[in-house]
Image: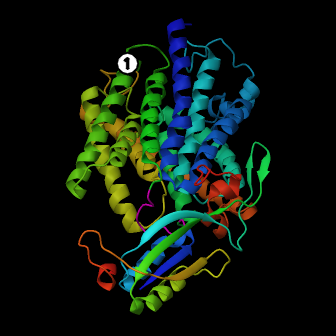
Amino acid sequence: MKLIVAIIQPHKLDAVKNALEAVEVNLMTVTEVLGQGRQKGVTEIYRGAKEAGGLLKKIRLDIAVNENFVEPTIAAITTSAHTGCVGDGKIFILELAECIRISTGERGGTAIG
Amino acid sequence: MNTGDTAWVLTATALVLLMTLPGLSFFYGGLVRRKNVLSVLMQCLIILCAISLQWILFGYSLAFGPDFHGIIGKLDWAGLRGVGSLPNADYAATIPHSLFMIFQAMFAVITPALIIGAYAERVRFSAFLIFTLLWSTLVYDPLAHWVWGTGGWLKALGALDFAGGIVVHVSSGVSALVLAVLLGKRIGYNHKPIRPHNLPFTVLGAALLWFGWFGFNAGSALAADGNAVNAFITTNTATAAAGLTWALIEWWHNGTPTILGAATGAVAGLVAVTPACGFVNPMNAIFIGMIVAMICYLAIAVIKAKLGYDDALDAFGVHGVGGMWGTIATGLFAEKAVNAAGSNGLFFGGAQLLLVQLLIVAVTVIFAALMTLIIFKAVDALIGMRVEEKNEIVGLDLTQQSEAAYTVIE
């Protein structure tokens, strides 16, 4: 089991969600986050005071999958979230020790899907 | 001169200001995405500033000044020369001429602000400002002269527009449609509405529009009299009928009534009753409201989705379509028993009025569409109407104004 953490552009969320559903990855958690990478933030000005390069809004996806879904999930995200510009985001893959479905008490691979 | 009339029209003027800011700006502001809410508020505020100045410098004179062949007002009243506290009997015999001028200024302000609904979330700020000034001068001012100005050629034909169904709503609504088509769709628009970021704002804005519209419609009587009271009652009645009808249509069509639907219906009702409010009785205002809800629902939820143009906040669907219906409805339901200065509509034995109303709709649609096309092409060639793709994605608040409405983390 792996936990896939993806940081993407906010406007790509719909496209990514559709691409994931197309490879039968239907379960995910979505959060709005702030971050900075190679893409520069936009300067903000409040009553004349400049604040250079603030953090940018991004979307974070947390997706827990069984091994055979890892590569399809990565492929779905990289193609659907891609624009070719800095700021497209990153994907992190983490080992997942356990997964428990609260409603039934199921554990492991059967609890994920 | 009448102090009661003066006090009421002063009050009504402030009410109409409230329609633009915060009424319309929050109505629209709630409908856009979080990254663009400030851009809508800014556009409304800047229109209020810029057109207030345009109006007293030359706009008022172009619209209401001494007639030049029925087409435009001469510049005799530019800079408010001769527009003082003595009444002008042609427009309002019992209030100061300067009060009529500032009351009309608020109409000139809200009209270009209505168009924001079409180009929201993708227009360049500098282009918006130039477009607005040109549009006010070349579309609103002449049209106001034709319909309301002494000697205006549509007024001479006997066209009825009590508070601005044609001059304000059809003109802005049609221009909005032309702009929506020329600008193209927002990135990510796929034939269905982009989710509004703050519906409580939208409902707040709709409520302030309803409140301010009493000044718009009942104030257009330009007197504190029975005509104003009738306009007040018909306005409230048509709005109530339209809001309820819209919610019922949704309930029947989609399974649930929505607050956005009820609020949109109410605004459509306000639009439709605007040209008619001083000429129809309250019972017929119910029909005007019910029918506008049906027509606008069809235009927005069915036809727009099929055609695929991106009228982002339905400026055409509500103001253009609702204004056309209201103008035609005036030709059906107007009666001299309500207002002796009006005419009888088709249902009261006057087929002539309906023909004139249809004619002014056609003239306004053609004129506004053509002029908007020309102004758009000029401004687009000069500086580009639309923002760059990457700026549209980041949002207009950050890229056009260098500020953000909401913090995620303090």
Q: Is residue B192 magenta?
A: yes
Dot 1 falls on a residue whose secondary structure is helix
Amino acid type at image mark 1: Val
Instruction: Give the residue number, with chain letter if any, for mark 1.
Output: B229
The residue stretch that appears in magenta: B186-195
What main secondary structure does the magenta stretch of the protein show? loop
Task: Name which residue lies at 26% across and 32% down.
Answer: B284
Please rate how many residues cluster around mark 1, counting C-alpha atoms within 10 Å: few if below 14, some from 14 to 19, many from 20: some
B376 and B408: which is toward the camera: B408
Tell me if residue B151 can be seen.
no
Quadrant containing the N terminus of chain B is top right
Measuring from the top left, give residue A77's x and y in whole percent: 50, 82
Above or below, comparing residue A35 to residue B38 in the picture: below
Residue B93 placement, left or right of A20? right
Tell me if residue B26 can be seen.
yes
- For mark 1, name the chain: B
Task: Name which residue lies at 54% across and 36% down.
Answer: B22
Above or below, comparing residue B391 to residue A72 in the picture: above
Above or below, comparing residue A17 to residue B358 in the picture: below
Measuring from the top left, give residue B381's x and y in whole percent: 72, 64
